[in-house]
Image: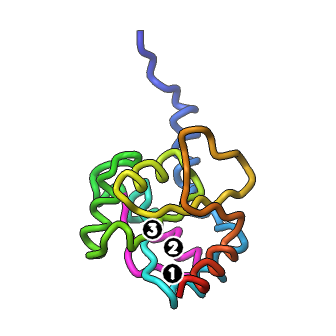
């Protein structure tokens, strides 16, 4: 038999969801994003809604040229639909895109499946498991800036 969540559990879930919009980015993110936005078109593909991603972008200094969300795609990653939507709207070939992912479970596989190059931002929290791969492995956003600088 299925049980409904308790009122306390629902309150905890609502509290957690509302707190997510206040989470600060990693300390190296705002400066790196400020530099990268002058080198590339920056466009996150997020498993969130538009409101949450706008709030997160503001905490990073609003470096993005486009924002792509699961809400817009009407699909959550690991579906390829959010990536397909971004490719279509950016009018780029998949090989022209590098998708940077901190969390690999929902990003690396679908991006690679479509021919998008990938960079895994390994913050040292967990290892990349068997079955997952990335074109680049970085330990911080400063390395992403250097990668971009060398690619220009």
Label 1 or label 2, whichever comes before in sequence order: 2
Question: Mark 1, residues whose alpha carbon is within 10 Å: few (<14), some, or many (≥20)?
Answer: some
- Residue 44's tag is 3
Image location (x, y in percent) of residue 151: 55, 82
Q: Give the extent of the magenta segment.
A: 54-69
In the rendered view, tell whether residue 31 sits above or below residue 83. below
> Disc 1 vs disc 3: which is toward the camera?
3
Left or right: residue 55 versus residue 126 is: left
Q: Are marks 1 and 2 in contact (CB under 8 Å)?
A: yes
Q: Are marks 3 and 2 in contact (CB under 8 Å)?
A: yes
- Secondary structure beneath dot 2 equals helix
Q: Where's the N terminus, which quadrant? A: top left
- How many discs appear? 3
Closer to the N terminus: mark 3 or mark 2?
Answer: 3
Q: How are the residues colored? A: rainbow
x and y percent of residue 76 in the render? 37, 48
Q: Earlier in the sequence, mark 1 or mark 3?
A: 3
Quadrant in the picture for residue 123: bottom right
Q: Residue at x 41, y 56 (%)?
A: 111
**Residue tagged by mark 2?**
57
Q: CA distance from mark 3 to mark 2?
A: 9 Å
Q: Nearer the viewer, mark 3 or mark 2?
A: 3
Q: What residue would you read off at disc 1?
A: 62
Q: Measuring 41% from the left and 71% from the top, which residue is drawn there? A: 97
**CA gap, disc 1 to disc 3?**
11 Å
- Label 3 sits on a secondary structure element that is loop
Horizontal relation, residue 6 to residue 139: left or right: left
Circle 3 crowding by C-alpha within 10 Å: few under 14, some 14–19, many from 20: some
Depth order, front residue of 50/14: 50
- Disc 1, disc 3: CB below 8 Å? no
Rendered image: mark on residue 14: none
């Amino acid at each position: 038999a299925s049980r409904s969540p308790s009122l306390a559990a629902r309150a905890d879930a609502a509290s957690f969801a509302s707190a997510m919009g206040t989470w600060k980015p990693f300390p190296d993110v705002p400066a790196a994003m400020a530099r990268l936005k002058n080198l590339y078109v920056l466009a996150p593909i997020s498993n969130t809604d538009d409101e949450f991603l706008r709030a997160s972008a503001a905490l990073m200094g609003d470096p993005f040229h486009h924002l792509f969300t699961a809400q817009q795609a009407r699909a959550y990653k690991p579906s390829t639909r959010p990536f397909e939507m971004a490719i279509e709207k950016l009018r780029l070939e998949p090989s022209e895109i590098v998708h940077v992912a901190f969390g690999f479970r929902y990003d690396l596989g679908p991006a690679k499946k479509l021919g998008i190059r990938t960079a895994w931002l390994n913050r040292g929290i967990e290892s990349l498991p068997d079955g997952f791969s990335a074109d680049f492995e970085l330990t911080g956003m400063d390395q992403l800036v250097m990668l971009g600088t060398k690619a220009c």
